[in-house]
Image (tube, rainbow, N blue to C red):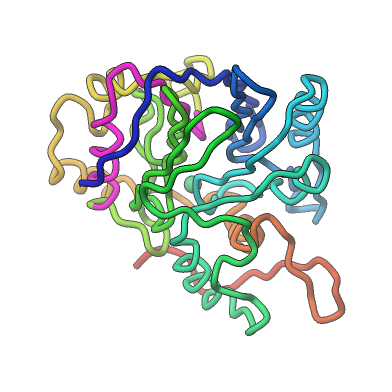
Amino acid sequence: MHSYPVDMTQKPLIKGFFDEGTNTISYVVKDPATSACAVYDTVMDIDYAAGEITYDHADAIITYIREKNLNLEWIIETHVHADHLSAAPYIQQQLGGKMGIGDKITVIQDTFGKIFNEGTEFERDGSQFDALFADGDTYTIGDLNAFAIATPGHTPACMVHVVGDAAFVGDTLFMPDGGSARCDFPGGSAAELYDSIQTVLSLPDEMRLFMCHDYGPNGRDIAWETTVGEERKNNIHVGSGKTKADFVKMRTERDATLSMPKLIIPSLQVNMRAGNVPADKDGNPMLKVPIKGLKNT
Ligand SMILES: [Fe+2]
């Protein structure tokens, strides 16, 4: 296994922004020593039925960064989300920063380029982003050292980003009582997700983990922060010694019962373009709906 440059002595300041429409948490991660910051997994609001996009969630993040006089260095996606649209280009336009995602985005672009029957003008080389991370790649946020861990399973391009003593787990894990993310999208794999989760759980017990989603299972309040130690002990899908065979069986059976996320059709088309809405031949923003199913069968 890759050995990652973990440094628990660096403690970034982290502010979560919960999006009620999609149960997504976006994060502003600040270097305590400088004004540098990064944002992870931003959200652009869409009223799909009305064909209308708004920016309340992204504007709250922009206001926060401006009020604190922060310098935005990175706008990072843990993966190509299927349940919400990224606001990365909208934020970049106003605050700068480099957009980054996992280098396996090319696999996602190839898969969904075919499903949405995109023409050759849709590039499948990740060039819509400023940076593509491979497993173990490092970067900095001011004086903070950060690195990316490839965590395929939910999707082939998923990554967990570690900044000092904090990790942004994307859809690899949910809170201990939420378990794990589905693996039935094209390119998903429950066996791969199990292995990826084991990599995350091999990080130090005290590492803070920040979720991308929370649905408040069993009526509890929304929460998004836990630790590696907590997940290892208590996660209902992978905690306290559950085997890979148990996990794959549970995940496969459960995924078969799930309906597709409400916003998967717009989300994939926009997010595989780094948050840009596609245009029709006359340049009008326009989305497609393929009528052939999206399940990973
Ligand atoms: Fe996801």
- Identify whether 236 is placed above or below 130: above
For image coordinates 74% across by 26% down, the residue present is 70
Give residue 205's position: percent from left, percent from top.
Answer: 28, 19
Residue 193 falls inside the magenta stretch = yes
Residue 296 lies in what quarter of the image?
bottom left
Residue, far bottom: 120
213 is within the stretch colored magenta: yes
> Nearest the camera: 57 or 40?
40
Determine whether 260 is above or below 194 in the image.
Answer: below
Residue 283 drawn at (x, y percent): 85, 74
Residue 145 position (above or below residue 151): above
> Which span of residues is magenta-colored?
192-214
Task: Specify whether 269 is left or right of 221.
Answer: right
Q: Position of residue 88 (x, y in %)?
A: 69, 47
| 73 horizontally vs 151: left or right | right
Is residue 11 positioned above or below 148 on the image?
Answer: above
Answer left or right for 285 relative to 33: right
Which residue sits at x=71%, y=46%? 87
Which is nearer the eye, 85 or 206?
A: 206
Quadrant assignment, res 266: bottom right
Residue drawn at the location 64% of the way across and 76% of the way down: 122
Q: Residue shown at 59%/40% (left/top)?
A: 41
